[in-house]
Amino acid sequence: MPDVRVAIIGGSGFYQMEGLTDVEEVRIEKTPFGQPSDAIVIGT
């Protein structure tokens, strides 16, 4: 996973965030808090 500097935690309204480019979806299998409900979206 790339080095990420800022994170936005969102819901259904953030799937197609205006101005977000170079989008990459990363699937995380497990975190200390359990499995995420969806992919992590990374972009610039």
Image (cartoon, rainbow, N blue to C red):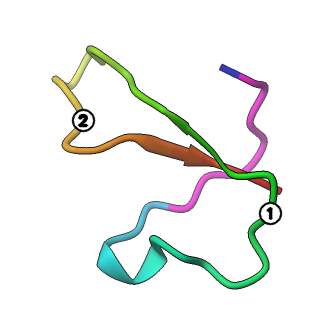
Q: Is residue 36 left or right of residue 18?
A: left
Say which of 33 and 43 sits in front.
43
Crowding at label 1, few (<14), some or many (≥20) Cα neighbours within 10 Å? few
Give how far across and how far down residue 31 sits, in percent: 30, 18
Q: Which residues are magenta?
A: 2-8
Crowding at label 2, few (<14), some or many (≥20) Cα neighbours within 10 Å? few
Secondary structure, magenta segment, majority class? loop
Q: Residue at x 60, y 78 (%)?
A: 17
Q: If the image is split into quadrants, where does the N terminus sit?
A: top right
Q: Residue at x 26, y 14 (%)?
A: 30
Q: Which residue is mark 2?
A: 36
Answer with the quarter of the image where residue 4 lies.
top right
Give how far across and how far down residue 7 sits, in percent: 61, 52
Give the spatial CA distance, label 2 vs label 1. 23 Å
| Badge number at residue 41 | none
Q: Residue at x 83, y 57 (%)?
A: 44
Q: Is residue 14 magenta?
A: no
Q: Name the front one of labels 2 and 1.
A: 1
Q: Which residue is mark 1?
A: 21
Give how far across and how far down residue 23 sits, in percent: 69, 52
Task: Name above or below for residue 31 compared with residue 17.
Answer: above
Say which of 12 and 32 sits in front.
12
What is the tally of numbered marks visible in this picture? Answer: 2
Q: Is residue 32 left or right of residue 17?
A: left
> Disc 1 marks which amino acid?
Thr
Give how far across and how far down residue 20 sits, in percent: 74, 69
